[in-house]
Amino acid sequence: MKDKIKTIIIIIIFSLILAISLIAILDRKDNDDRDLITVEYENNVVNTTNTTNEIDEEENNTIDENSTSEVIGREEKESEEESKDSTENNDEKAIKLVKEEWGDDEASVYFNIENKNGTKYTITVRSSDTTEAIAWYDVDVKTQKVTSN
């Protein structure tokens, strides 16, 4: 009886060792496949980068011929940025003019641009508690004229 138990225990131990070995081998194979895929991916990235560099070199050769259009593009971009800044500044100026006209009671109200047409704005003073419109002002930022409606 004791011999049968010893034999069963030895068989179980060998089975566990065999199972653990198989799992380790399969896991190593999976990692090797992942490494192979990673190496292939890296090679593709390197090849793509090399192709892109070759294309960039060709484009650089053609850009030299048309360098004046690039300068004009930069000037247009700067003028667009300046006009955007001036629009934002006009928005701020219009609200600032209305705040000056409204007075010191700014804690319970906020100012909203309802309409703008060029340098002419319609600013609404609204209650912070109810969002109800309390007053409307027409503002011409160019002349800095504020009129109450």
Image (cartoon, helix red, strand yellow):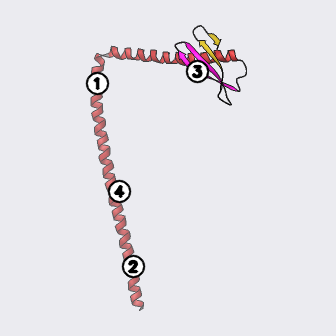
Answer above or below: position of 142 versus 44.
above
Residue 131 in the figure: left or right of residue 57 = right
Task: From the image, tell me which residue sits under label 3.
Answer: 113
Q: Secondary structure at mark 3?
A: strand
Q: Secondary structure at mark 1?
A: helix
Confirm or deny contact between disc 3 and disc 2 (CB under 8 A): no
From the viewer's side, name the closer residue of 142 and 76. 142
Residue pictured at 30% horizontal, 31% vertical: 53
Viewer-nearest of labels 3 and 2?
3
Classify 10 Å Cα crowding around label 3: few (below 14), some (14-19), many (20 and above).
Answer: some
Task: From the image, tell me which residue sits under label 1.
Answer: 59
The quadrant of the image that shows the C terminus is top right
Q: Label 1 to label 2, Cα distance in Å?
A: 70 Å
Viewer-nearest of labels 1 and 3?
3
Of the residues under marks 2 and 4, which one precedes in the sequence?
Answer: 2
Task: From the image, tell me which residue sits under label 2.
Answer: 12
Look at label 1 and name its amino acid: Glu
The quadrant of the image that shows the N terminus is bottom left
Task: From the image, tell me which residue sits under label 4.
Answer: 31
Q: Which segment did they paint magenta?
A: 108-128
Confirm or deny contact between disc 1 and disc 3 (CB under 8 A): no
Of the residues under marks 1 and 3, which one precedes in the sequence?
Answer: 1
Q: Label 3 to label 4, Cα distance in Å?
A: 61 Å
Q: Main SS type for the magenta part?
A: strand
Look at label 3 and name its amino acid: Ile
Q: Residue furthest bottom?
A: 1
Of the residues under marks 3 and 2, which one precedes in the sequence?
Answer: 2
Residue pictured at 38% horizontal, 17% vertical: 73
Q: Residue furthest top?
A: 143
Q: Secondary structure at mark 4?
A: helix
